[in-house]
Image (cartoon, rainbow, N blue to C red):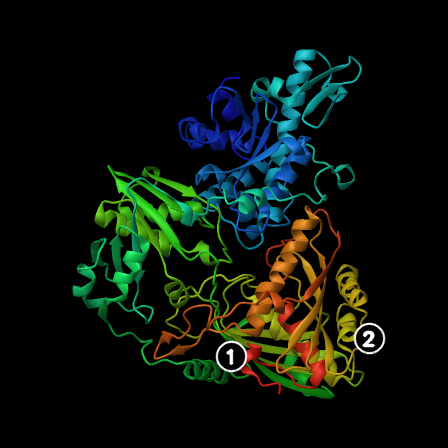
Amino acid sequence: MGKWSRRAFIGAGVAAGGALVVGVAVRQGNPIDRLGPLLTDGEDQQLLNAWVKVDADNIVTAVIPHVEMGQGVHTALAQMLADEMDADWNKVQILEAPADMQYVSDSIARDFLVPDLEVPAIFEPTVAGGILELAQAMGLQFTGGSYSVRATGQRAMRTAGATAREMLVAAAASEWQVPASEISTADSMLVHAKSGKAEPFAKFARAAAEQSLPARPTLKSPDNYRVMGQPKQRHDIPAKVDGSAVFGIDADVPGMKYAAVKAPPVIGATVESMDASTAKTMAGVLQILNMGDFVAVVADGYWQAQQALNTITAQYSKTEGDGLDQDAIFARYASHLDEAGEDGGDMQTEAGDVAKSFAGATTRVEAEYKVPFLAHATMEPMNCTAWVRDGKCDVWSGHQAPIHARQAAADAAGLAFEDVTYHNGYLGGGFGRRSENDAVIMATRIASATGYPVKMIWSREEDTAQDHYRPSATSRFRGGLDKDGRLVSWDNIHTHLFDPKDAPTVPYYNIASHKIRKVDVPMHLRFGPWRSVDHSQHGFFIESFVDEMAHAAGKDGYAFRRELLAGSPRHLKVLDTAAKMSGWGSALPEKHGRGIAFVPSFGSIVAQVAEVDMSGPKPKVTKVYVAADPGFVVNPDGFAAQMESGIVYGLTAALYGEITLKDGTVQQSNFHDYPMLRINEMPEVEVALINGDHKHLGGGGEPGLPPIAPAVTNAIFAATGTRIRELPLSKHSFA
């Protein structure tokens, strides 16, 4: 079987989406020289489109444009493609796509811009072409926002699989001289029952690549799914168990040197001078660099580089962050909120007359909540390996946005995008941190300055002190209840808004009069996406205040939320399921409590009930019940694991997570003062999954996190009568 031809590539396209893709392939020029060597190993492989490769032995390879960082997305996306293609799941392999503009996610761009737009077939190429051009301009080959399955999977991988299947059927129909409608597919085989003919996909792969691209391939209905909806073992697990998985930090290049780095302790400062006299004399040290915004030591080994770096003293420039401490930060928030008053700030959403409804309320409640800065604390510290030579650059790392990383390396090396080859590995934790380019830029600059291939590794201390943090925030609420205890007024103003914009809003709750505003507060720290982003803050804020309103109304927290969700049967089913699982309302031992929280996010609806034991010196979360409706669950085992994972990360933050400042400098440095949830602290988790809308899928990587903090703090109130309005819980005394 020969390698794919230019005609085959342009005919088959580089992305799912109909005839549009022909124009895209031509507009971008001939991609064969660039993608061919990356995706095919020899003459016995054939691409049907850039998402599907078929080998001579009938192995189907799904080319996945997203990175794997433990969320199981490689497996889920392959399931979606394989199901629509009718491929034999036992013979499906996975290949991560290269960092290339052919693999930008126009599906994510479309979800951002026009998620529910239905376009007549005649206009689809024009609309899709414009969206694809935007995605390419943004370099939108990105894994984050819980978008992979709900956007790329639903719109691209399924369509690519269906496209490949229809082209294979067309090729077989042509050779067998039978109607395509008489050919069936299953387990990577083409079958014509009337004649008794049956052949593997591989036999027709080359001919299929020459077929006309179907304008709108037919997608399966859920009743016909064979692979989607089934629990499948993740493809990445065996390699991670036997140690053969390659993460970014595992890069190994002949002649490679190691770099340890240290940036000024106050973010934004520069290195004005340094004393490296001792470091210069230490064994293995090759070069010491003052890069302005950081100091680097390059040595034969990482330990040598780090030990030498530890001896260097430096003087740093002054910044506006000097002298700033934690109390001053929250005082600054309070000042901005006070200044905004009842009508200031930036309006996010408003309905009804909040001032009138609040003034006329029978019962009024006001509360203020606070959450701290949070670090990502990925298991794999930030790292990158770069080699700049002969006008070319190779970069090895694990990154959530490979095209952005490739462009960042090109800019840092002063090269064109095409002169950089980016090698992406598994990510040892992402959580949004590995969407930033700082490590790539630093490693490339060091490699450019030294001429060596250099592996730069941040120490855990550097990783903690130089993060792109989840913002701290303060949120103030005023709520009003009528004489029947119904919530009639909702007024919220908060600091900071990162993403997504709907995180502070409550469209799912029936509140006739509501107003939500924000104020921006300048800060010298770097902010970045953190798992579930602003939902991690506002889930706690909103669900804590809802519980306070329920208590003021003399109602049970579950019953109160049921009233707010009246008329939303899908939402109610999730809430009811979580409550039923937990035995809501049944008796608990003394000093035990149950709390409930309900947070739709990233297209998925999630409710959680937490049980806590308050008989000891600190809260112990004993059980968490989760009900989740992401529309349709592609891999039940994988989705349930992500609910559990979100609880681990969110519970860590709720119990312990806090980055504090003194004189503008981050005080935490490692796991001893930025602790993680330990195995003996992990509650039992029970997950129920609901398929509520197979047409509109939700995400899985993040929605499990936002409800856990308020579920726990509401449970603490139920057990003790103490309201928690500030996280983490380690700040509070429960003796």
Residue 691 position in % (x across, y down)? 75, 51
Q: Residue 585: which numbered mark, if any?
A: 2
Q: Are marks 2 and 1 in contact (CB under 8 Å)?
A: no
Name the secondary structure under disc 1: loop
Q: Is residue 442 visible?
A: no
Q: Quadrant of residue 483?
A: bottom right
Please tell me in which quadrant of the rendered image residue 259 appears.
bottom left
Q: Where is residue 683 in the image (x, y as percent from the top left)?
A: 67, 67
Q: What element carries label 2?
A: loop
Rendered image: mark on residue 55:
none
**Earlier sequence position, callout 2 versus callout 1:** 1
Query: In the rendered view, would you say 72 is above or below 8?
Result: below
Drawn side of residue 198 relative to residue 426, left or right: right
Total labels drawn:
2
Residue position marked by numbered label 1 in the rendering: 344
Task: State the CA–CA distance, disc 2 to disc 1.
Answer: 42 Å
What residue appears at the point 68 percent right and 35 percent down from the top-left corner? 83
Q: Relative to the observer, which residue lies in front, 674 or 132?
A: 674
Amino acid residing under circle 2: Gly
| Along the line of sight, the residue nearer the viewer: 563 or 357 | 563
Q: Is residue 385 left or right of residue 365?
A: left
Question: In the image, what residue occupies the spot 45% across and 66% down?
Answer: 469
User: Which percent across, then down, holds residue 474?
Assistant: 52, 78
- Residue occupying the point 25% across, 38% down: 391
